[in-house]
Image: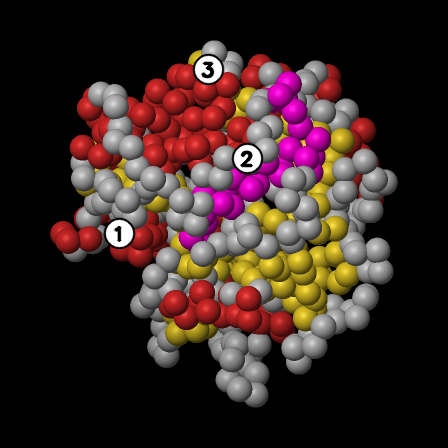
């Protein structure tokens, strides 16, 4: 690595492509792209976006799923100093429209199969708020030779859509510095080098796939094998076919793979390590490693910062913990933490409190939301909203989410968003959504509703109402009808009683 590692995404890609232009770097289905190929595609996307008026600071939304075109569009936007905004294709038109209204992209790059979804979202917006729609094929027709734009480390590179506790969408502003620092550091946390090929099984609209898999592959000098989607029945076969040696996973994936029917192909792959954002009980952790013939390591990060905690490489496993603070292999101890009690005092070892972090790989804030930004970044610390305990050896253990967020199928879901949809039904007078433990290790969503005066509620019809307005992973798995919902002394719904 150079003494001064590249500190923006365009510089990192150009540096890698200049050193090893013919090295195969990106693998998808039956195709592969060298670093020179990738740089060329990025240039073509940048030219096409510039032709459509994209300039520094503009947003470019991407609705193409886990495909190379999403990467090319992201990097192409960054080449122009613009901000990429990958969107979740599982969302419904009202949800897409809410994000488009928030982020106000100049262009929405949409795969042909998602054009109807994009058009439906655009139809819900005022004419002045609608982005121009273009397919990847239409974008790249403009040719080559993108304009040279100076991109700075502090510039925002990506907007990451996330659920707010109010139900309104938020967009995390992550900078080039975050991605560059993480590209250099992630390989050191999990032991990666130039011979490794990272399996991108998580969605590209998530920080994990962006900063750890994609940037990690650039930082390590290895390769990226991109999966269109996660399939438990084909996961190990896909990993073998694509030549992957490392993969990242969220909690539900680990449990689904463990619960799948054992088969001879369970060990017929080249994956030697999996990084997971989940601390399993020791018995399950070791069962996963033994069944699939690999090492499973654990870490903690979030859209707001890629530097959280991780199990130290080469040290004995500390089952049940999130590990110690992540640091940087070249810059040293750049990550600090506090565990803070409700009264603002620092918690003693073993005492629960909210985790606060301070490091240069922290978001610039929430797009268009100064109030939430100020709350999250108060006093120079990122307030994670997660309650943890720290032991005397500096290991952290997750306790609970302080925010009212439900974790389902690898996604964060705001209870208020579900409640707002249910309350919009003409028969519903009260609604509350809660997360309950799932056998997949995350949450199932259960809703409780009370009818309006004189009305009755058909729960199946209400679920169908929700399915039309919410992504499938947000739809409650069960809806229970009560005459009234329990209340606290301050007239809030007593969700602890519903749970």
x 82%, y 60%: residue:
391
Q: Is residue 170 visible?
A: no
Q: Is residue 339 toward the left or the right of residue 227 in the image?
A: right
Name the element at disc 1: loop
Range drawn in magenta: 172-201
Q: Is residue 415 visible?
A: yes
Residue behind mark 3? 21
Name the element at disc 2: loop
Q: Please determine whether, in this image, residue 421 is positioned above or below residue 151.
A: below
x 31%, y 53%: residue:
103
Where is residue 355 shown, x and y percent of the image?
65, 63
Where is residue 478 shown, x and y percent of the image?
53, 56
x 50%, y 18%: residue:
19
* Closer mark to the observer between disc 3 and disc 2: 2
Q: Earlier in the sequence, mark 2 or mark 1?
A: 2
Q: Earlier in the sequence, mark 3 or mark 1?
A: 3
x 65%, y 67%: residue:
354
Question: Label 3 neighbourhood size at 10 Å, few (<14), some (14-19), many (20+)?
Answer: some
Where is residue 436 shown, x and y percent of the image?
62, 58
Residue behind mark 2? 5
């Amino acid at each position: 690595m150079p003494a001064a590692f590249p500190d923006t995404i365009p510089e990192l890609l150009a540096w890698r492509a200049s050193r090893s232009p013919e090295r195969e770097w990106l693998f998808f289905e039956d195709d592969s792209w060298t670093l020179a190929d990738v740089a060329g595609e990025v240039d073509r996307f940048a030219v096409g976006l510039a032709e459509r008026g994209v300039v520094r600071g503009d947003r470019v939304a991407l609705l193409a799923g886990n495909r190379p075109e999403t990467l090319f569009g992201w990097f192409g936007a960054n080449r122009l100093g613009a901000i990429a905004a990958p969107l979740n294709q599982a969302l419904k038109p009202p949800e897409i429209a809410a994000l488009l209204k928030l982020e106000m992209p100049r262009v929405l790059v949409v795969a042909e199969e998602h054009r109807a979804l994009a058009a439906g979202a655009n139809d819900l917006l005022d004419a002045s708020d609608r982005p121009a729609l273009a397919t990847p094929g239409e974008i790249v027709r403009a040719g080559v030779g993108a304009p040279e734009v100076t991109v700075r480390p502090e510039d925002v590179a990506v907007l990451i859509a996330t659920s707010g506790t109010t139900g309104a969408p938020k967009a995390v502003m992550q900078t080039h510095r975050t991605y560059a620092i993480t590209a250099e550091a992630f390989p050191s946390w999990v032991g990666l080098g130039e011979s490794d090929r990272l399996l991108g099984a998580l969605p590209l609209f998530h920080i994990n796939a962006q900063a750890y898999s994609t940037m990690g592959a650039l930082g390590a000098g290895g390769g990226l094998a991109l999966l269109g989607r996660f399939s438990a029945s084909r996961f190990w076969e896909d990993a073998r076919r694509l030549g992957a040696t490392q993969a990242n996973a969220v909690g539900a994936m680990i449990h689904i793979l463990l619960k799948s029917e054992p088969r001879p192909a369970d060990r017929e792959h080249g994956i030697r390590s999996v990084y997971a954002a989940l601390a399993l009980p020791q018995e399950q952790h070791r069962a996963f490693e033994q069944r699939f013939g690999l090492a499973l390591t654990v870490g903690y990060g979030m859209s707001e910062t890629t530097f959280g905690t991780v199990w130290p490489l080469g040290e004995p496993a500390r089952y049940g913990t999130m590990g110690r603070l992540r640091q940087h292999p070249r810059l040293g101890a750049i990550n600090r933490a506090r565990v803070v009690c409700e009264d603002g005092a620092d918690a003693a070892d073993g005492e629960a409190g909210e985790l606060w972090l301070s490091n240069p790989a922290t978001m610039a804030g929430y797009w268009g939301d100064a109030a939430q930004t100020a709350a999250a970044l108060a006093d120079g610390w990122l307030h994670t909203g997660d309650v943890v305990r720290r032991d005397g050896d500096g290991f952290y253990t997750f306790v609970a989410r302080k925010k009212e967020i439900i974790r389902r199928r690898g996604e964060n879901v705001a209870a208020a968003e579900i409640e707002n949809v249910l309350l919009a039904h003409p028969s519903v007078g009260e609604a509350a959504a809660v997360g309950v433990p799932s056998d997949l290790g995350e949450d199932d969503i259960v809703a409780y509703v009370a009818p309006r005066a004189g009305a009755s509620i058909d729960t199946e019809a209400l679920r169908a109402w929700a399915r039309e307005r919410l992504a499938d992973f947000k739809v409650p798995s069960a809806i229970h009808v009560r005459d009234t919902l329990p209340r606290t002394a301050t007239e809030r719904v007593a969700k602890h009683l519903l749970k």
